[in-house]
Image (tube, coloured by chain):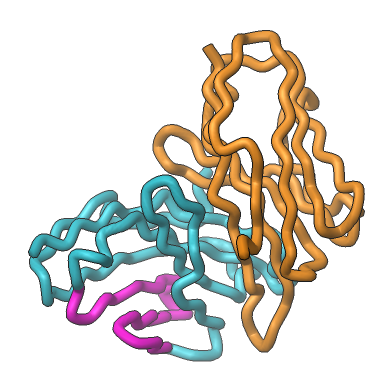
Amino acid sequence: DTAVSQTPKYLVTQMGNDKSIKCEQNLGHDTMYWYKQDSKKFLKIMFSYNNKELIINETVPNRFSPKSPDKAHLNLHINSLELGDSAVYFCASSQWTGGNYGYTFGSGTRLTVV
Amino acid sequence: QQQVKQSPQSLIVQKGGIPIINCAYENTAFDYFPWYQQFPGKGPALLIAIRPDVSEKKEGRFTISFNKSAKQFSLHIMDSQPGDSATYFCAASKNDGNKLVFGAGTILRVKS
C-alpha cells in the first residue's frame, strides 16, 4: 500500500495551460506539504497544511493554489503555466512520533511545460 | 541565501569505503537534523535524524556526527555498497518540525 500517492506521475503541458496535481496519504498524518525539486535537485517547501488549515505559504507565485478538502488530501492547482514551472513536485506528510517528525514523501510528479 | 550548506556535490567511493557528507547551518533555532536518501524517480526517504543534545547517532551502517558549537553535522556510511548509490540530502528544521530546509544534495556513487 502506497503511503503518500500523487497523480499524475508525469505531466507534459503547454505554456499558459492550467493543471492540477493530486495527493493522498493513508498514514493518518495531520500535516501535508508540497515541495518543489528543481533541475539541480534542490528541494524547497512551497506549502504546508495542518488539518486542512494553511500554515506555511512560502514566496510562491499566486498562480499556485493548494487545496485541502480533508486532512488526507492536498491538491495543487497551477494556473497559466510557465516554462520555469518545470520541475518535480513532491507531496509529503508528517506526524510527530517519538522524537522524529516522520516525514514521508510521495514519488513525485514531473511537470514539463513546453 | 542557502540556510543549510552541503558538501561535496558528488562523491565516488569504492565498495566497502566510508563516504562522508558534510552539512553546515547558520540558524541556531534549528533543532532537528534529518538525512534523506533519494533514488532516481523516487521521493526522498528518511534515513536517520539527530537532535542537538546528542553528538552522535548510529543506525545500522549510517552514523550522524553532530558538532553544535561548529554548527555542523555529517553523515558517514560504513561498509558502503553499490546499492547505496543515490542522492543524499541533509536538512534542518525548527522545533515545530513543519518546514524542512534542505541542503543542495550529494550524489554518491559506490563502485563495485
Residue A81, magenta (yes or no): no
Q: Colour of chain B?
A: cyan
- Residue sitting at x 53%, y 34%: A110
- Residue sitting at x 59%, y 40%: A89
x then y, percent, for residue A27: 72, 69
Where A63 falls versus B78 (above or below)? above
Indicate the quadrant containing the C terminus of chain B: top left, top right, bottom left or bottom right. Answer: bottom left
- Give the main secondary structure, helix, strand or loop, of the magenta stretch: strand
* Count of labels in the image: 0
Chain letter corresponding to the colour orange: A
- Residue sitting at x 37%, y 57%: B6
Q: From which residue to which does the magenta span run? A: B57-80
- Residue sitting at x 55%, y 82%: B51
Query: In which quadrant of the rendered view does residue B12 lie?
Result: bottom left
Residue B72, magenta (yes or no): yes
Where B106 falls versus A66 (above or below)? below
Task: Report the front residue among B91 and B41.
Answer: B41
Which residue in the rendered view is the most extreme toward the front?
A: A1
Task: Report the front residue among A4 and A104.
Answer: A4
Query: In which quadrant of the rendered view does residue B22 lie?
Result: bottom left
Where B39 falls versus A19 (above or below)? below
